[in-house]
Image (cartoon, helix red, strand yellow):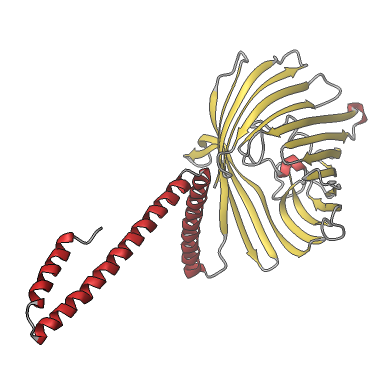
Amino acid sequence: MRIPILIFVIFGVMASLLAQESSPEAEKMLKTLKKYENKFKKYEQRIEELEAEVGDLRDRFDEVESDERVEELRGEVEELIDETQGEVIEERTISLLNRYFGNSYMSLGGYFNVEYLNDDKSDSTGRFRLHRVSLFFQKRVGQFNFFTEVEFEDAPKFEGEGGDEIEEARGEIIVEQAWAEYLYHPLLNFRAGLILLPEYYNLNHYPTTTFATNDPLHSGNILPEEILGVAIYGDTYGELHPDFGIGYQLYVSNGENPNIGKEDVNENKAVGGKLTFHMPLFGLLDIFDLGVNVYVGEDDEDNRDFIWNFEAIIETERIFFHFEYAEGRKDFDVSANGLEESYGYYAFLGYQLTPQHVVFTRYEFFDEDRSDEERITRLLFGVRYRPLPEISIKGEIFREWHEDSDEEDFNGIALSFTMLL
C-alpha cells in the first residue's frame, strides 16, 4: 500500500495558499499539515516493512508445506486430538459412575469374534460362525481384586414351553473363569475360585492375542482348561535379579467332573502347579521363558491322572517362536484296561513384516490314545493384520492328516475378525 501522490499535491497547494496569508491561524494550520505529512511517511515506511515480513512468512510457509515431516506431525496432532476426546468421554463416563456408585464401580470389557470356515471334506460346507462374545468384569478394592469372564459361544438361544421341555436350544453360556485374589506381595499372592490352568496357550487363547484362528489340536484335550479351588502364585523376576527370575503357581482343586462348580466326585483333590523360568535375554531377546506344568488327580471314575507339559516362549521384536509338548496318563484301577496315554505338541514360528502384519506357520500333532491309530497332524500358514491394536483380522490355510482310516484327510481355510471391547 502506498500514500497517493494526490495527497501530497493537495498538501502542497494548501501550503502555498496558506503561505500567502500572514495570519497566525494560517501558520498554525501549516504546522499541523507538516506534522501529519511526517506521520504519513512513517506509516508508509511501516507498511513497507510489514509487506516484507509477510513475504518472508509466505516463503517459510511454502517451505514447511513441502516438508514431509509436516504430514507426520499433522497425523500425530490428529491422533492426540482423538485420544484427548476419548479421555474426555471416558472422564465424563467415570464422573457419571462416580455420581451414582462412588469410586467403587466395576470395569467392563471383553471381545467379539466372528469366523468363516471352509474345507474340502465331502460332508462339510463353508460356514460363518459367531464363535464368541465374551464379557470381562473386574473390580479392585485395595489389595483385593476380582475378575470374571462370561462367554457366549455360538450365539446362544434357549426357549421352552410346558414345564421342563426344551423346544429350542443352541450355543453355550459359560463362566470361563471367576476368581478373587489378595495381592500381598509380588512373591506371594492368593487366589480362589474358577481359575484357568496356567498353561501358556490356555492363558493366552483369546482371539485378540493369538496369531491363528484355529487352536492347536491338543489344546483343551489333555490338560484341564480350568480348575476350581485355591492357588498361591508369585514371581521373582525383577525382585531378586534383574536378568533372571522364577515364577510359580501351586493349587489344590476339585477333580475333573461334569459339574466342577458345584461338587467333587471323590474325597481326593487334584493338586498341581507350574514353574516358569525367565531366562537371561543377553540383550538379543524380548522374552525367553521355559515352563513346566504338572497336574495330579482323579476323574469321576477313580482313574488316576498324571498330566504334564513343557513349553518354550522365545520372542524378539520381529520373530516369535512358541513350542509346547503335553502328555496325559490315566492309570486305570482295572488292570485289564492297561494304560491310556494321550499326547500332543505344536511348534509355531511367526515373523512381523510390518507393525500391523505378522506371517506365521504352525505344525501340530495330537494322539488321543497311543494304543489306537487316531493320530492327527495339521500344518497351517497364515497372516494376522492389526490395523488398530483393538482390531485383529486373521486368515490361514491348512492341511490335516488322519491315520484313522474312517477319517479323510482334507484342506481348509479359516478367516476371523476380532474386536476388543
Q: How many marks?
A: 0
| Quarter-of-image position of residue 140 | bottom right
Percent across and percent down for residue 220 are: 73, 36
> Which is nearer the eye, 300 or 12?
12
Q: Residue at x 32, y 60 (%)?
A: 48
Q: Position of residue 178 (x, y in %)?
A: 66, 53
Residue 240, position in %: x, y?
A: 87, 60
Q: As rendered, which of 105 and 211 lies closer to the eye? A: 211
> From the viewer's perspective, is residue 347 above or below residue 33?
above
Q: Residue at x 81, y 38 (%)?
A: 301
Pick out the residue farthest to the bottom. 24
For the point 54% across and 47% down, the residue is 421
Q: Let me know if residue 225 appears in the view.
A: no
Which one is in front, 266 or 85?
Answer: 85
Quadrant (top left, top right, bottom left, bottom right) of the N terminus: bottom left
Give the side of residue 52 with respect to residue 368, left or right: left
Q: Residue furthest right?
A: 335
Q: Name above or below for residue 379 compared with residue 333.
A: above
* Quadrant of residue 29 within the rendered picture: bottom left
Coordinates of residue 392 in the picture (x, y in percent): 58, 38
In front of the other: 112 or 352: 352
On the picture, is 57 further left or further right than 32? right
* Any part of residue 21 in sight: yes
> Which residue corresponds to the image point at 17% horizontal and 65% vertical from the top-left?
8
In the picture shown, does residue 91 fall above or below 68?
Answer: below
Q: Is residue 193 left or right of residue 15?
A: right
